[in-house]
Amino acid sequence: MKTGLRPAAAAAATALLLLISSGCYDIVELDTISIVTGVGIDRDEKPGLIRLTVQVGKAETVGGGGETGKEISEKAYLVLDATDRSIVGALDSLRQDNSRTLFLHHNQLIIFGESLAKDGIADDIDALMRYHQSHMNVYMLVAEGNAREVLDTEMELEKIPSVGIDRMIKNKMEISKVYGVSLLELVSKLIDKPSAAAVPIIRTIKEKDMSRLSLQGLAVFKNGRMVGKLSENQTNGYAWMLGEIKSGSLKVNTSKGSAELNIRACESKVKAIFDKNGMPKIRVDINGRFIAEQLIGFGGQPLEEVIGLLNKVAADTVKQVVLSCFKQTQRLNADIFGFGSHIHKYHSRKWKALEGRWEQIYPSLELALNIQTEILGTGKISISPKTA
Amino acid sequence: MIVVILLAFAAMLVLNLPSLIKNRDFKLIAVYCLFYAASLLFSLLLAFNVKVPSPIIFVDNLFRAIRLSY
Amino acid sequence: MTIEHSKISASQFMFSIACFLHSSSLLTSFFVPITKQDSWIAHTIAMILCIPLMILYAQLAKSYPGLNLIQINEAVFGKVLGKIISLFYVWFFFTLVSLNMRDLGNFVSKTIMIKTPMPIIIILFILLCVWSAYYGLEVVTRYSTVFLIISAVILLISIIAITSLINPENFLPVFDLPIKNYIQVTHISSTIPFGETVIFLMITPYVDKSPKKLLRYFVGGLLIGGILILLVMLRDIAVLGNTIGYFSLPSFEVFRLGILFQTISHMEIMFSILLIILLYFKISFLFYASMLSLSQTLELKTYRPLLLPCAAFVAVYSIINYQNILIQIKAAQETIPFLWFTLEILLPALTLAVHYIKKSAAKKGNGKEAALR
């Protein structure tokens, strides 16, 4: 190349490179997208159709600083919905009727309506996993009633309800991790054999002229369909069995008095024992440690006796809670604890014989619970102050 | 699309041809023309959406025919 | 007669092999759906089985010091047969370039730039590879160490980011699947990342260490690259568990899930950048080696004028090869292991065998002559 031409060619090449490497084709500007923070899927009145609700956060109202008074009345979120045969179709129609494209990368929740959950969520899970913009760590919830109602409920302390629900979930996860079920966990449990999962339930409670949201209980899924519910108490039993309780309190009633125990730690170990016919029996060792938060009515009893009594009664209380949950799952015939999965993982050869019959085995599965409790302390004081 | 392809191939020629002719290495020029013609042909065929048979699928079918596959 | 005049150091050689192998960690999606949680076992077995393969390559390089693969073929098989076999290799190397380009195009267009047409991504990339191949071997392999260190750091960061999501039970049940799956995946794993190192026989003459000592660099590169892929696989299985067989890009999903210090999340762009860097190294090296082999087979003085038309050819070839990714995955799982086996293992082994036969025939001939005198 001639010497004069070289710098010119280099300059031209650099200019071209600069133009090309900015990736103009796929440009996404912040004011052309609507950021979706929550997705709700309900069954529509017309058969075969679903109603997709998205909660879109308005970036301007949340971010704007300094001014007070004017923005309180303006909602920081918007709820849009569309009806179609599938999630992707509904997302498409939402895109077409809007001035902005939907941006689902920051979605926090996916809420299934109760009637849709009872019909089966496997098809929707397929669409959700395939969709490029969905992330596997969104929290899954089942709404008691309609998902749209839940997404439309304003929260007092949070500008965007989905963010508020996300924080609520994280709050409840401080008590026990079973309240946070991500899409990845749900799929992993649904594709397992036997297929069973438990998803938290969220409901809207209407009080006087306001409504608030509450997370209570779990929805039990079997083979992709919701078959029943677990109450708040039974949810605690579920958490105890899995060893997933991190804090919270346990009410203990004895003949001599009652107490509130604060749960400090919990471990559980599952073991499958086989008898000579190859039938399994599950043994679970649960170890709980507590601190007494309130002692009611123990009179003038020495502390060691009180602690000893509380230990024993705490173990019985935990046992009752766990058994109540276990019996409910046996009624629903849904192995949400993963006992079948445990046998598959640790005794895979024996599982091959049991796999086909697990449906019949589970409702009459024997469970041997061995609960050890330990009361680590009694808080800042040791004996109750005598007031009378 | 076709205009872009033709422009790119013309640019290639402009860049390389002077030095090729100066060296007078006929084998090199022959190989150059071979690859140039082949890539020009196939890229135009692709631009016109003509289905080009793929050599590796041919070998793939060959191996399946002699049952050397999983 | 050598076309290439620069020399690289032996450690550059070793890190080039390691970087080359590590960039294939994207290709785990080829065999993970078959063995799911046990993929790491099959991969480790493949890595150990390929150590004799490295011994084979090092022995071939030792028997003909100063000659690269194409020249070795001619020396062993004679001019005509040697050229025919070399043409097979040339086709193989060009196909490798185009398949890897296609992988890159697929990856970029599926994850980062969804609307950009794939030919544009491929053309921009190949121009960059042309640029580095223009300057020769030293430039192509110069950054191997740096790229490897960067990828090791990002791998470490990702492992820290997902520690809360690891569930050791995800590795169970072990050995639950039919034996055929394990054999298939060991076969795929030993041919698709590990066997492609036959291309390094093209540059063994240009390493500034005597070929007798090359074995340890071959094996070192294999082990470093293989262990890095193993770490990637272990991380993916620990997080995704039984869902790993469903995803087409498991590492991408794992990066999406990772969260660092509660603020840095959605790190998939780091994975994309890393992968583009590693694939750039692999493709530019493959392109350079295929240009070198082409010009060596045709006995040209230099490959530089051929760079642009061959780049255009490779770009078009990569779009023609597999029109859609499902066929590519199916072929990679079923027939490619056998095809690659003949080119990567059978042919070099045959070459070495013929070399030994010739050597012993020559010794016998010498012995007879000595006896006759």
Image (tube, rainbow, N blue to C red):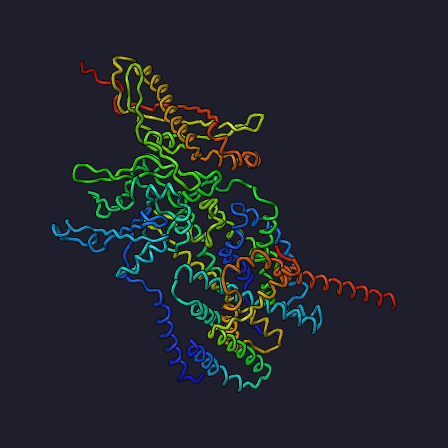
- Nearest the viewer among A126 and C83 is A126
Image-quadrant location for residue A153: top left
Q: Is residue A170 visible?
A: no
Spot the residue most to the front.
Answer: A46
Image-quadrant location for residue A64: bottom left
Spot the residue most to the right.
Answer: C372
- Nearest the viewer among A361 and A22 is A361
Q: Horizontal and vertical percent for residue A136?
A: 39, 48
Q: Is residue A285 above or below residue C109?
A: above
Q: Is residue A132 left or right of residue C210?
A: left
Where, quadrant-wise, is the C terminus of chain A in this rendering? top left
Q: Horizontal and vertical percent for residue A31?
A: 25, 61
Tally of numbered tags: 0
Q: Is residue C355 above or below residue A373?
A: below
Q: Is residue C158 above or below residue A171?
A: below
Q: Is residue C32 left or right of residue A383?
A: right
Q: Horizontal and vertical percent for residue A304?
A: 33, 16
